[in-house]
Amino acid sequence: MNQLHTVLTGDLIKSRQATSADIAAAFDCLQQTATDFGQVWDIDLRFTRFRGDGWQVVLDVPGLTLHAIIHFTATLRAAKPDIATRIAAGVGTTDSLGTADLSDATGPAFFISGDHLDGMSPKRRLALAGQGIGTAQCAIIDLTEFITLGWTAGQAQAVALAIQDYPRTHDEIAQDLGITRQAVQSRLAGAGFAYFENALYAIRNHDFTTAQAD
């Protein structure tokens, strides 16, 4: 079997109501998130902007799918609380990862991701589909969406640092944010971050190559 990838396709919510400066800042944040995530995990996410308010990245390690979804959601919420992004993750093979970026990339993972973003209900923020994805993995994404919708900017900021180089100590996060360890603990507790531990482990160790959709 060809190598599996996860493609994350996203777009900004209510982008037409935002200023051009806010949109530019949101995309700068997403691109920096892709760079930071790639440096930590030693992968090239090939961040690509398309269709005006759309964006896309690719992961060559499907087990990092939930890590990436949480990281992108958290960093944008922390930097631009008034602008959110939808994300559809598609797991599958790829025919081409494109040339200079993902604008000419193609393959099942790209089709799955793009189709699920296009078909997503306006009330939803996250979706996951593709090879090895069943009801258990979709349930994790549904609960992730519910939890992240309640984050404040401060909680999201703490989560973004916690998830980027997971696991990180509270002391390290406190030093980065310039706040106390107790404040970090309070933010992460309020964000429900501890409840992601088993979900992150489950997705990271899930066998996408043999598992079949339920």
Image: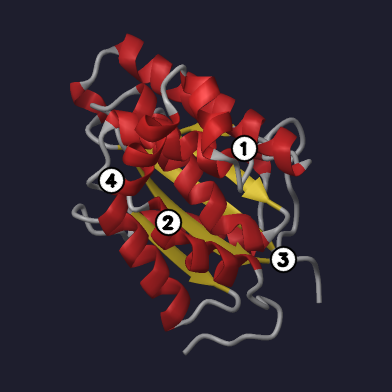
Q: What element carries label 1?
A: helix
Above-or-below relation of 18 to 34 = above
* Mark nearer the viewer, 1 or 4: 4
- Which residue has dot 4 on it? 190
Q: In this view, does 21 lie to the left or right of 38?
A: left
Q: Earlier in the sequence, mark 2 or mark 1?
A: 1
Give how far apart the Cα atoms at labels 3 and 2 are: 29 Å
Cβ–Cβ under 8 Å for marks 3 and 2: no
Residue 103's disc is 1
Mark pair 2, 1: CA separation = 37 Å
Front-most of 23 and 160?
160
Label located before the other in sequence (1 or 3): 3
Q: What residue type is labelled 3?
A: Leu
| Quadrant assignment for the N terminus | bottom right
Q: In this view, does 202 lie to the left or right of 115?
A: right
Pick the residue in front: 116 or 156.
156
Residue that carries the numbered disc 3 in the rendered image: 4
Q: In this view, does 196 lie to the left or right of 102?
A: left
Identify the image quadrant of residue 100. top right
Residue 170 image offset from top left, x and y in percent: 51, 37
Question: At x 68% / y 78%, what residue is drawn?
Answer: 207
